Amino acid sequence: MTTQIHSVDRELVEAAARVARTRCRGDNHTMAAAGRGRDGRIVTAVNAYHFTGGPCAELVLVGTAAAQGIYELETIVAVGDRDRGVVPPCGRCRQVLLDYFPGLKVVVGEGERLRAVAVTDLLPESYVWADHQVDGE
């Protein structure tokens, strides 16, 4: 696997960190995510924790972006509350992000080691949801 490293979108990281500091309250909302659409707009979201499982901030972001007319995300980052910093997406989120945005860059790492990598590098040799769909031809 050759890791594709891209420049880190610092504005995006700060947007997620700001939401984590100001909107994450208590155990129900502990993670914030920010994504940049192809048109340059930034959208943010928080997770919705529930004991039955609940959507991670990255998944809430996918729906929030669509609700705002942003259907193509270029880069995404998740940041934990209580100054935990950048948190990489869980396996489920990696799969969903790959399925929705195969060209997506994801910010991972911490401190001086922050980097943006292709979502395909986070889920090598993965199943691609669209592969099950039959072409109309």
Image: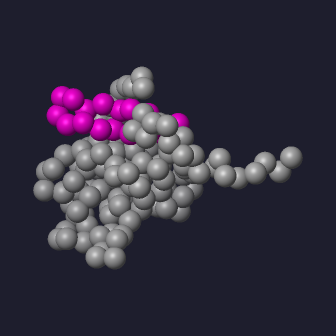
In the image, residue 92 sits, relative to residue 24, either above or below, namely above
Residue 118 sits in quarter: top left
Judged left or right of residue 15, residue 101 is right
Colour convention: one colour
Q: Is residue 41 visible?
A: no
Asked whether residue 88 appears in the rendered view, the answer is: yes
**Residue 24 location in percent, x, y?**
22, 64
Q: Quadrant of residue 53?
A: bottom left
Q: Position of residue 102 (x, y in %)?
A: 54, 40
| Pick the front one: 3 or 109 | 3
The spot of residue 101 in percent (x, y) is 53, 44
Q: Residue at x 22, y 54 (%)?
A: 80
Camera-side residue of 92 and 59:
92
Looking at this rendering, what residue extends furthest in the right direction? Answer: 137
On-image quarter of the N terminus: top left
Is residue 46 a member of the stretch shown in magenta? no
Please, which residue is most extreme toward the left here? 82
The stretch of residues the image draws in magenta is 103-119
- Observer-nearest of 22 and 89: 89
Q: Which sits in the foreground, 6 or 17?
A: 6
Q: What residue lies at 83% left-to-right and 51% top-to-bottom?
A: 136
